[in-house]
């Protein structure tokens, strides 16, 4: 089983190195690993200068006793200009909505203790995202770090921010 994983990793690496890279992109797809949410992330820009678009996340979350979450954000991507560094890093800011589903033991903190919701709890709310993204000009990929503060209006929980790392392939 370990050899299959190594072969799959090697094949993916060779594919990434063989695809011609573009400095600007309109769509990317990849993975996010976070404090709570881990999953698939997609970003798509609506204009050719790649500065306004949508970002979506479908993820498994460790909040409560595990659950599922989805997020959709409108994002604005701004280059960080520093002539001395010559590093292609962008600042991304955005906002949008999210929803979640938890089979059991999702809770809120009330008077210093856990107040559990019923089984099969749905959540919904608003959130924001603040990101730094390195856009590789040599390889067709981006690397990012992000902070996503959020608030659930429907069944609030104990958490209010999620931090994460992303790796995306530029399509």
Image: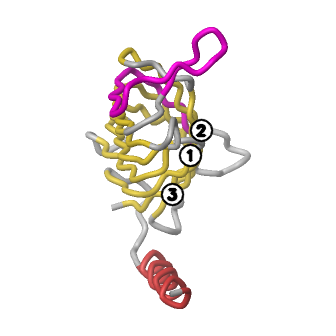
Bounds of the magenta span?
107-132
Q: Which mark is residue 105?
A: none
Packing grade of label 3 (10 A; few <14, some 14-19, many >=20) is: many
Q: Is residue 91 magenta?
A: no
Is tag 1's residue or tag 3's residue first in the polypeptide sequence?
A: 1
- Residue occupying image coordinates x 38% and y 25%: 118
Q: Secondary structure at mark 1?
A: strand
Residue 170: name its quadrant. bottom left
Residue 106 visible in the shown view: yes
- What residue is disc 2 on? 163
Q: Which mark is residue 34?
A: 1
The image shows residue 163, relative to residue 6, as above or below, that is: above
Packing grade of label 2 (10 A; few <14, some 14-19, many >=20) is: some
Is tag 1's residue or tag 2's residue first in the polypeptide sequence?
A: 1
Callouts 3 and 2 close, C-beta under 8 Å = no
Q: Is residue 147 left or right of residue 55?
A: right
The image shows residue 86, relative to residue 118, as above or below, that is: below
Q: Which mark is residue 167?
A: 3
Q: Secondary structure at mark 3?
A: strand
What whole-number distance in Å separates the C-alpha atoms at marks 1 and 2? Answer: 5 Å
Packing grade of label 1 (10 A; few <14, some 14-19, many >=20) is: many
């Amino acid at each position: 089983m370990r050899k299959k994983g190594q072969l799959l990793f090697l094949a993916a690496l060779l594919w990434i190195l063989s695809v011609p890279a573009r400095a600007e992109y309109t769509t990317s797809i990849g993975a996010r690993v976070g404090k709570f949410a881990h999953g698939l992330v997609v970003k798509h820009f609506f204009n050719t200068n790649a500065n306004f678009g949508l970002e979506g996340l479908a993820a498994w979350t460790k909040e409560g006793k595990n659950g599922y979450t989805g997020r959709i954000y409108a994002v604005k991507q701004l280059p960080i200009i520093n002539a001395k560094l010559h590093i292609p890093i962008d600042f991304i800011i955005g906002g949008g909505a999210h929803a979640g589903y938890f089979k059991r033991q999702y809770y809120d903190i009330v008077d210093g203790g856990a107040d559990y919701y019923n089984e099969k709890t749905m959540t919904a709310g608003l959130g924001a995202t603040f990101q730094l993204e390195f856009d590789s000009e040599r390889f067709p990929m981006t690397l990012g770090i992000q902070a996503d503060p959020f608030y659930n209006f429907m069944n609030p929980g104990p958490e209010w921010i999620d931090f994460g790392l992303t790796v995306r392939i530029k399509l």
